[in-house]
Image (spheres, rainbow, N blue to C red):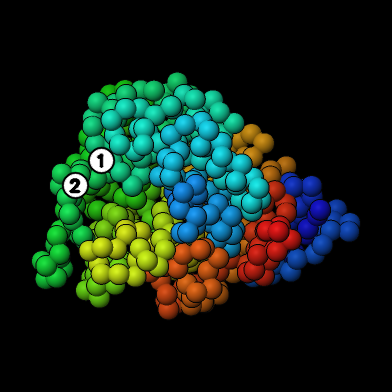
Amino acid sequence: MSHLLRGVAPLGGTPTDLLIVDGRIAAIGPDAAREAGSAEVVDAGGLVALPGLVDLHTHLREPGREDAETVLTGSRAAALGGYTAVHAMANTSPVADTAGVVEQVLRLGQDAGLVDVFPVGAVSVGLRGEQLAELGAMAQSAARVRVFSDDGMCVHDPVLMRRALEYVKAFDGVVAQHAQEPRLTREAQMHEGVVSAELGLAGWPAVAEESIVARDVLLAQHVGSRLHVLHVSTAGSVEIVRWAKARGIGVTAEATPHHLSLTDALARSYDPLFKVNPPLRTPEDVEAVRAGLADGTIDVVGTDHAPHTREDKDCEWAAAAFGMTGLETALGIVSTTMVATGRMTWADVARVMSATPARIGRVDSGPRAQGRPLAVGEPANVTLVDPAARWTVDPAAHASTSRNSPYGGMELTGRVVATFLRGRPTVRDGALVEAVVA
């Protein structure tokens, strides 16, 4: 299977031709057309080529909550969003805290065949924060787990967190922390500030996140291990990560699309679509997260794709589940908030949405290598984006089983046109290649 992408702009640079043969990039530039032979020609004029996107933070819900999402439907959403790999979080039912469960998720991803699904293992048994899960067994399993997280719950016990950080060093793993001090957020409903006081909703203080981030970067320094801070949402957290990096501590950090684009003022609608964990923060926090992403303090954009059924979201605010979908809108949000505003280039997008998440997750080498550069000989995981496209988000048209997107009716710039997984098109002309899904 071969394709000639004619007139494409790698990373937004000079338009050229790019030839894909047998799952790899065979030629770039004048040689591509000369060597194309019978390759299918794709008119890519005006399009930007990015390495296939990699998400470090996806909730696929299977096993256990197939009413909200399955590995197949989540894979469809990911491919449409330009992703060629996702890391599936561990808060399933049963929890992915054993080799058997992570291998089940791996097989489901392979059966779907649309993106590489890399399971994330739980840090603690049942996400209860009481004893370490089978970290070594999951690392040595067929899933070769390297990212461990209790996301949805904080590893709040400092002794357990220290032990986890020490344990993963043996196989170059990373602990991805959901930073939330539970005693400071009991019954909290939204960011603690002017809007929460106005609405009479229990507040979620920024310090509940910042105190855990501060503690954990010091623990990572103490044991010489790798820490990844999930969904950074406050200006204070950005500053702590910046401080830690200046001292050479092994910390990386993530921003979500919604913390780059939405604020706590949206809670005034009492629409549970805007209820998320950590909560939407102030405009000043949003600006700090954008600045941190632009200057490299924040390493990656992770979707925190969190699908929920209508029953779990279409209810009163206090009873609604926390979470938003994000796979099909993430690139558009980053394009709109960061590229269109001049704060980032498409090369920067490739760094924060492909190369760096692949490196952090240790999936940048081997037979399923992701996040590799667009260069001759590299795997042809490629996303084509129309940077000039303006489009309106319609959650009803999403491939995800759930529809809890906060962006319905919002106009975004930059849209995925095609996605190639090791040279095989999974999305063409903005639509799934049905033969792959079947």
| Percent of width and height locating residue 156 | 24, 36
Judging depth in this view, the residue of 6 and 262 nearest the camera is 262
Q: Nearer the viewer, mark 1 or mark 2?
A: 2
Circle 1 Cα neighbour tier, 10 Å, few/some/many (<14 / 14–19 / ≥20): many
Which residue carries the number 2 mark?
208
SS state under label 2: helix
| Percent of width and height locating residue 51 | 60, 52
Circle 2 Cα neighbour tier, 10 Å, few/some/many (<14 / 14–19 / ≥20): some
SS state under label 1: helix
Which residue carries the number 1 mark?
213
Q: Residue furthest right?
A: 37
Task: Check the image and report above or below for 436 versus 195.
Answer: above
In the rendered image, is residue 279 in sight?
A: yes
Give left or right: position of 311 versus 367.
left
Could you tell which of marks 1 and 2 lies nearer the N-terminus? 2
Judging depth in this view, the residue of 184 and 353 nearest the camera is 184
| Percent of width and height locating residue 422 | 70, 48
Task: Check the image and report above or below for 362 versus 289.
Answer: above
Snapshot quadrant of residue 343: bottom left
Residue at image point 45% right, 38% down: 96
| Percent of width and height locating residue 307 | 43, 59
Q: How many marks?
A: 2
User: Could you tell me which quadrant the C terminus lies in?
Assistant: bottom right
Residue at image point 46% right, 24% down: 136
Task: Check the image and report above or below for 124 versus 74.
Answer: above
Task: Check the image and report above or below for 138 versus 46.
Answer: above
Q: Amino acid at mark 1?
A: Val
Residue at image point 53% right, 48% down: 86
Q: Amino acid at mark 2?
A: Ala
Residue at image point 59% right, 31% down: 142
Judging depth in this view, the residue of 63 and 143 nearest the camera is 63
